[in-house]
Image (cartoon, rainbow, N blue to C red):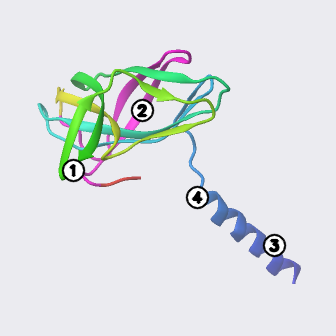
Amino acid sequence: MKKILKYMFALIFLISACGRSTPAGIQDSIEISVPYAHAAGAGETTAVYMVIKNNGTQADRLISASCDAAMMTQTMESSMEGDVMSMGDVPVIELPAGGTVELKPGGYHIMLMDLMKELKAGSTIRLTLEFEKAGKMTLEVPVLVIGAAP
């Protein structure tokens, strides 16, 4: 009976650990998780998505992003206006104290434009984020097949 209980506890622990994600980066009170980009060819455009959590007691702001794989990097937001999807440049992304902001398809995202090389699924790219208070954070971002999410 003890042996069965031991295996049950081990199984419960393993199952509960599966739902947790290890942060991809932490800088001061800012925590980044599940960053990813989609595969694209040289000269093309793709996007980077992630979850940004501000664990601090003060608001912060994402003020810029840069990537060594792209000629130009911009923070942008997609939104629906009636039946039309539009996209525009966002100078900063506000990160409220104790809040979480998800960069996802159809919302905030980081555009990588005029890629200098092909981004193949299974590879990684280096992305640097700059926060107003937390400073710079560099991440290794996995590249996934088009349409996939972690």
Q: To which quarter of the image does residue 81 belong? A: top left
- CB under 8 Å between callouts 2 and 1? no
Residues at marks 2 and 1, CA–CA distance in whole angstroms: 37 Å
Which circle's residue, 4 or 3, is located before the other in the chain?
A: 3
Could you tell me the amino acid type at mark 4? Gly
Residues at marks 4 and 3, CA–CA distance in whole angstroms: 21 Å
Label 2, secondary structure: give it. Answer: strand
**Residue 6, label in figure:** 3
Mark 4 or 2, which is nearer the eye? 4
Label 4, secondary structure: give it. Answer: loop
Answer with left or right where residue 27 lies relative to residue 90: right
Which circle's residue, 2 or 3, is located before the other in the chain?
A: 3
Which circle's residue, 1 or 3, is located before the other in the chain?
A: 3
- CB under 8 Å between callouts 4 and 2? no
* Residue that badge 2 annotates: 140
**Residue 19, label in figure:** 4
Residue name at image x 56 percent, y 39 percent: 23
Which circle's residue, 4 or 1, is located before the other in the chain?
A: 4
**Residue 82, label in figure:** 1
